[in-house]
Image: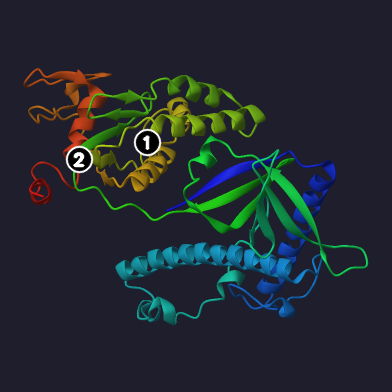
Amino acid sequence: MIRSSKHILKYQTEKKTDLLNQIFYVFESDLDFYTSLILSDKLPLRPNMSSKLLPANQISHSQWKQVVYKTASECIRSQIKKASDKRYKVYKKLYQKCIKTNRHADFISKRFSELKLKTIYVSKYFIKPFYENISINIDERLFDVQSGNHFDEWIRIKTPFFQDNKHRSIKICIPVKHHKHSNKYSSWMRKDTIRLRRQGKNFFVDFIYEKAEPEKKLIGKTLGLDQGYKKLISTSDGIHLGTNLNSLYEKISKKKQGSKAFNRLLKHRDNEINRICNKLDLSNIRELVIENLKNLKHKSKLSKKTMNKMQRWLYPATRRKLERLCEENGVLLTAVNPAYTSQTCSKCGHVSRENRHGEKFICLRCGYEDDADTNAAVNISRMGAYNPHSSEAMVYKNL
């Protein structure tokens, strides 16, 4: 398992802040420089390269040149993969069309790898990386961390700049304070890499932590979980979490997209999702069953006004948080098709759209009444890998 903690760098002197600004300025300049050289075939595209083979632009420090080249290489290779996947999908669609119409026999007789296509980064599918709000990953060669007195720790960074008339790099010590989130990982192994970031006028550092994933639990119960717009989480135990987020979505939808208030509310929403998910007690849970809500908003028939509010409900963020929690607690996470779970009676199994009346569920056949989201969560819990009727459940039951 890999996690990270974010720390704001605001306790250093103004002179050190100026040096951080200069680091990002020369780094971005050289990043664009190496990117252009690679795309023009003046530099080979490799994961890493010896500093002796790298020309100097703004940065002449050998280790920093390697960091810049590695970052440029990662960005280009990422763009190449995206472009290659996009081109493959286009040609696959064209191939199927030619098969149906029985045209271009020479084209459909070849494999995709046999087609004489342009190098991907000179094709129309490739977009040159645009560097904005970049992060700088530096390894132990360029920094070390020391314990402090007035501050929790000090990061000593070897900058790409040299002292006057000397061959030694200028070093700066940046104070760091830990917080509630980072203290969670005090027993984890901290990796020998940090990530420097600049957002607006602020600087941040990310520490990276690693720990072996615990084995999945063999005993415990299965918990179903229904995700919703008005209730973020409803469990098969009848617990509802995040029932006041609707007002937050309303506030976000009324703000101008991209404004400071808009971005501030988005950050508040993400923090609320994390806070709410952390309330889930997984201590005696073996399996958590959730809905697979992929493409929920795709080709939706909801009104534009409703969709504007719905898009502020970030269910992928909830799922990512649940994935991390299950990973840390040794809980099996299962995603199931949510079709008809809100229309099915969890007591008798009768399926009807008329069973649901807003937030209330009343079965037309047996008269069973419950909260609609709780009823759906119970149905979801029975669709997991270890549901009561599966052969796997009997195996684990006899352990």
Q: How crowded is mark 1: few (under 14 residues within 10 Å), some or many (20 or more)?
A: few
The dot on residue 85 is: none
Residue receiving disc 2: 220
Q: Earlier in the sequence, mark 2 or mark 1?
A: 2
Quadrant of the rendered structure where residue 91 is? bottom left
Is 302 on the left or on the right of 164, as rendered? left
Q: Position of residue 320 (x, y in %)?
A: 41, 44
The alpha-carbon separation of the residues under discs 2 and 1 comes to 38 Å
Amino acid marked by disc 1? Ser
Q: Position of residue 346 (x, y in %)?
A: 13, 29
In this view of the protein, which residue sits in the foreground, 76 or 51?
A: 51
Judge depth for marks 2 and 1 and give the one in front: 2
Depth check, front residue: 68 or 311: 68
**Which residue is painted at 77% across and 55% down in the image?**
23
- Above or below for 1 versus 95: above
Label 2, residues with CA under 10 Å away: few <14, some 14-19, many ≥20: some
Q: Which residue lies furthest to the front in this view?
A: 149
The residue that appears at 68% across and 59% down in the rendered structure is 143
* Residue at which label 1 appears: 300
Helix, strand or loop at label 1? It is loop
Quarter of the image where one finds residue 37 = bottom right
Amino acid on which the number 2 mark rests in the picture: Gly
Name the residue: 45% across, 34% down.
274
Residue at the right extreme of this rendering: 165
Secondary structure at numbered mark 2: loop
In the image, residue 23 sits, relative to residue 281, either above or below, namely below
